[in-house]
Image (tube, rainbow, N blue to C red):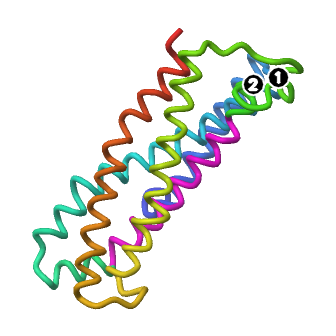
Amino acid sequence: MQLLDSARASLGFAVLLAAGMLVIFLGVAGGDALSLLSFLLRALHILAAAVWVGLIVFVNFVQLEALRTADPEGREFMHKMIVPAVAFWFRHASTATVITGALLLVPIGYVLPTLAYGSSVYIPPARAVLLWSAVLAALAMWMFVHMYIWPSMQVVLGLRPGTSEAKARARARVASFARLNLILALPVLFAMVAVAHLY
């Protein structure tokens, strides 16, 4: 079956199913533009974050361990076939998470509330502190990806010049910042869920 032969075809079909469910729901229950925008941004934010966190777990518990124990031929194969694809999705999922999260702050009233609601919105101080702490930690995670992990990966993969010593330092830096992403991922996830669902 062609639908199952391609990840892109499977994903496309999944998007169609989700869009169909949304259209049916809106047809039955209705909804206003602001709540629809908020829902779509939240759904995209959650999807991007799921990919990013999933890759953080994969990199830390699978990829780095496999690279550490692989022989030179196995490491070369992974650097050629697996690591570049993981790095691509890792970078872009982190950026999509940050962008959709920043945009989501407007319709839920944390940023520019008068734009969405015509007046200020009361946000309990504890919730605001939790949210903005998570935002800062998520931005740090994004910075780790783009300023430290990806430039170091480019050295490891030979996309930027580097001696064997430079490659060893780059591998250590990748591992360290991947661990920092892992350390921050759960608190950020907890805080974001708590802000949206704890009352």
- Residue that badge 2 annotates: 35
Residue at the farthest top position: 199
The answer to if 159 sits in the magenta stretch is: no
Q: Quadrant of the N terminus?
A: bottom left
Decide which of 14, 182 is in the foreground and name it.
Answer: 182
Q: Amino acid at mark 1?
A: Asp
> Looking at the image, which residue is at 75% across and 29% down?
107
> Looking at the image, which residue is at 76% across and 16% down?
121
Say which quarter of the image contains residue 167.
Answer: bottom left
Q: Which residues are magenta?
A: 81-104
Is the residue marked by circle 1 packed among few (<14), some (14-19), or many (20+) residues within 10 Å? few
Seen in the image, is 129 located left or right of residue 141? right
Question: Where is residue 4 shown, x and y percent of the image?
Answer: 43, 57
Decide which of 6, 65 is in the foreground and name it.
Answer: 65
Question: Where is residue 79 shown, x and y percent of the image?
Answer: 30, 78
Is the residue marked by circle 2 packed among few (<14), some (14-19), or many (20+) residues within 10 Å? few
Question: Where is residue 75 shown, x and y percent of the image?
Answer: 20, 78
> Looking at the image, which residue is at 19% across and 70% down?
67
Decide which of 125, 105 is in the foreground and name it.
Answer: 125
Q: Amino acid at mark 2?
A: Ser
Residue at the farthest right position: 118
Q: Secondary structure at mark 2?
A: helix
Q: Which mark is residue 32?
A: 1
Q: Secondary structure at mark 1?
A: loop
Q: Give the distance between the C-alpha atoms of the residues marked 2 and 1, in whole angstroms.
A: 6 Å
